Structures are given as structure tokens and as C-alpha cells.
């Protein structure tokens, strides 16, 4: 799932009278963000400690502020910056150069302890 599936999956919101025209955002969000967004849109208070973040400012006000810059789940981490994707767990880290192939199959293995995040 971390290689490409689950990333770059479209998320659509339909809210007549509030979302005035189609918006296209290139941001990292999660399904965890849907609940706080709906609660926020309904005028409720998003509970403390919830993992998701409301996307309402991005939806209603075309806010370009980043919602998040990474996701970490189940001991496997993925981070993307510009054309590079970093994937890894506790032992192995791999850096993919997305600029070389459309699906990120060109990979650089990097020994643990020698990785510099870009």
C-alpha cells in the first residue's frame, strides 16, 4: 500500500450552497480527516486528541496551508517531498525517485544510519 496505492487517491466533497466551484488540491490528507471535517462543518466541536484534522479551511476558503506533511502507521513510515518518497520500518529504509519513472519503481536502498531526509 505504501508504494503507491492509498496515495494520490481522490477525495471528493459535495456540499451544495457551500462549495461554490470545483477545487483541486494537491495535499496529503487522510481518511482520519473526514470525521473532524464533518463535525466542523456541522458547527460542532472536534474532540481533543482525535488523530484527524479538519479540512474545512481548505474546502471553504481555498486555504493552501498544508494539513500535514507525513503519515506514520503500523511501524511503517512514508514521507514524500517533491520527487522523492522515503519508505521504511525499523530496519530497512528505501528512497524512491519519482522523477525517473511514473510509478516510483526506481529505488535507492540506503543503509540504516546513513539516511538524510530531504
Image (cartoon, rainbow, N blue to C red):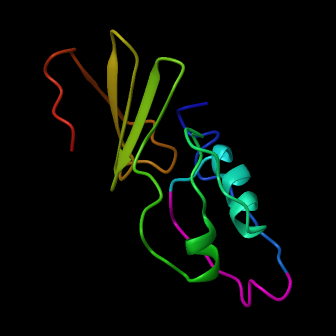
Which residue is located at x 43 percent, y 28 percent? 77
Which residue is located at x 60 percent, y 40 percent? 50
Residue 2, relative to residue 102: is it above or below? above
In this view, the residue in front, 117 or 71, is: 71
Residue 2, relative to residue 111: is it above or below? below
Residue 7, relative to residue 114: is it above or below? below
Q: Position of residue 58 (x, y in %)?
A: 56, 73
Magenta stretch, main secondary structure, is: loop
Q: In this view, does 8 lie to the left or right of 113?
A: right
In which quadrant is the C terminus drawn? top left
Q: Quadrant of residue 37?
A: bottom right
Q: Where is residue 26 in the image (x, y as percent from the top left)?
A: 51, 66
Task: Look at the image and give the residue range highlighted in magenta.
Answer: 16-27
In this view, the residue in front, 52 or 11, is: 52
In this view, the residue in front, 25 or 111, is: 25
Residue 86, relative to residue 66: is it above or below? above
Q: Where is residue 6 in the image (x, y as percent from the top left)?
A: 64, 41
Amino acid at each position: 500500500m505504501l508504494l503507491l496505492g492509498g496515495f494520490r487517491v481522490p477525495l471528493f466533497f459535495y456540499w451544495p450552497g457551500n462549495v461554490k466551484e470545483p477545487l483541486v488540491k494537491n495535499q496529503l490528507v487522510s481518511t482520519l480527516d473526514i470525521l473532524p471535517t464533518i463535525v466542523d462543518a456541522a458547527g460542532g466541536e472536534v474532540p481533543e486528541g482525535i488523530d484527524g484534522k479538519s479540512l474545512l479551511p481548505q474546502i471553504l476558503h481555498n486555504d493552501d496551508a498544508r494539513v500535514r506533511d507525513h503519515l506514520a502507521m503500523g511501524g511503517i513510515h512514508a514521507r514524500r517531498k517533491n520527487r522523492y518518497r522515503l519508505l521504511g520500518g525499523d530496519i530497512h529504509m528505501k528512497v524512491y525517485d519519482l522523477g525517473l519513472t511514473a510509478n516510483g519503481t526506481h529505488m535507492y536502498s540506503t543503509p540504516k544510519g546513513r539516511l538524510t531526509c530531504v
